[in-house]
Amino acid sequence: MTATEIVLERGEGTRSVLTVWSAAEASAPVVLVVPAMGMPSSYYHRFGEALAAAGVHCSLMELRGHEASGGRLPGRDYDFGYVDMVDDVADAVAATRAVLPGAPVVLLGHSMGGQVGFMYAALHPGELAGIVLMASSTPHWRTWAPWILPLSLGFVGASKVLGHFPGQRVKFAGRESRGVIRDWAHLARTGRFVAGEEGLSGVDLPVLAVSVEGDWLGPRAAVDALVAKLPVATVDREHVDAEGIDHFKWARRPEVVVPRIVAWAASSVRAAASDASR
């Protein structure tokens, strides 16, 4: 399936690519994928193609610092955090709407992508038609595990010394900016986002929250704790227990998760959009 690529320029001089797969029906919802920490957008191509083939548009953004081309490696002279990535989501939403005008935009956040997506929803009310959480949770030590607290502090310390976080060496994400690790550690320590926390209580959207059996990077209790930040949202909760599926591999096995997302979009997102237009 042929995809459309759109170059997004940032004021700082870097750029990213938005990849869009169009479904047959122009008015179908579009799922905007925000990758997990350290993940290249190419990892989700099979998923994007499968969504479009199943009747739902897919728009896939690149994470800052992990662009295939046009970006800069995080380092002492190039730092950014969660709020900067929220700005990137805003740019991706605007570009997605330009390509698919009239299509309800659903944000799908994988792992850290769901955390950034929650911040976007709180800071940009009324812009989304729904949220999908894929293996996305809060790393807050009270709901994840107590050991995450000293580990997160160690990550922050290493980032300060090196000028970046060497995730590829410790097998946790990739080369990340000091700011991203700082903001992730803040969430792990306090249970609160660095911005947008207060606005979450007013996010009234359909939400599909999917956890994965045996996922130590997204424990069920921590997924539920993230969802609990949206007290007025309409939440559908799914748990996937399938052979060969883990925190990451769901994207390479789209036949397991795509039908769930398509069915939820048809019953919740389209229904909500129809009610809003009356």
Image (spheres, rainbow, N blue to C red):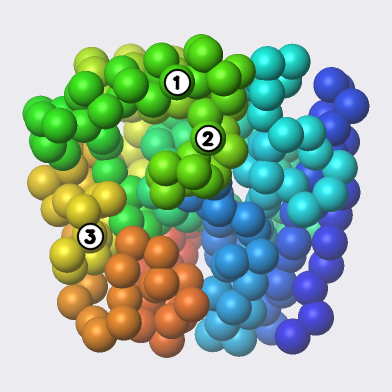
Disc 2 and disc 1 in contact, CB within 8 angstroms? yes
Rendered view: 166 above or below 259: above
For the residues labelled 2 and 3, the Cα–Cα distance comes to: 23 Å
Q: Secondary structure at mark 1?
A: helix
Q: Residue at x 36, y 53 (%)?
A: 133
Marker disc for residue 166: 2
Rendered view: 49 above or below 143: below
For the residues labelled 2 and 1, the Cα–Cα distance comes to: 8 Å
Q: Is residue 42 left or right of residue 143?
A: right
Image quarter where the N terminus lies is bottom right
Q: Give, as a three-letter code, the residue at label 1.
A: Ala
Q: Is residue 138 left or right of residue 16?
A: left
Q: Secondary structure at mark 3?
A: loop
Rendered location of residue 276, percent (x, y): 46, 49
Residue ID for mark 1: 158
The answer to which of marks 2 and 1 sits earlier in the sequence is 1
Q: Residue at x 84, y 61 (%)?
A: 5
Marker disc for residue 215: 3
The answer to which of marks 3 and 1 sits earlier in the sequence is 1
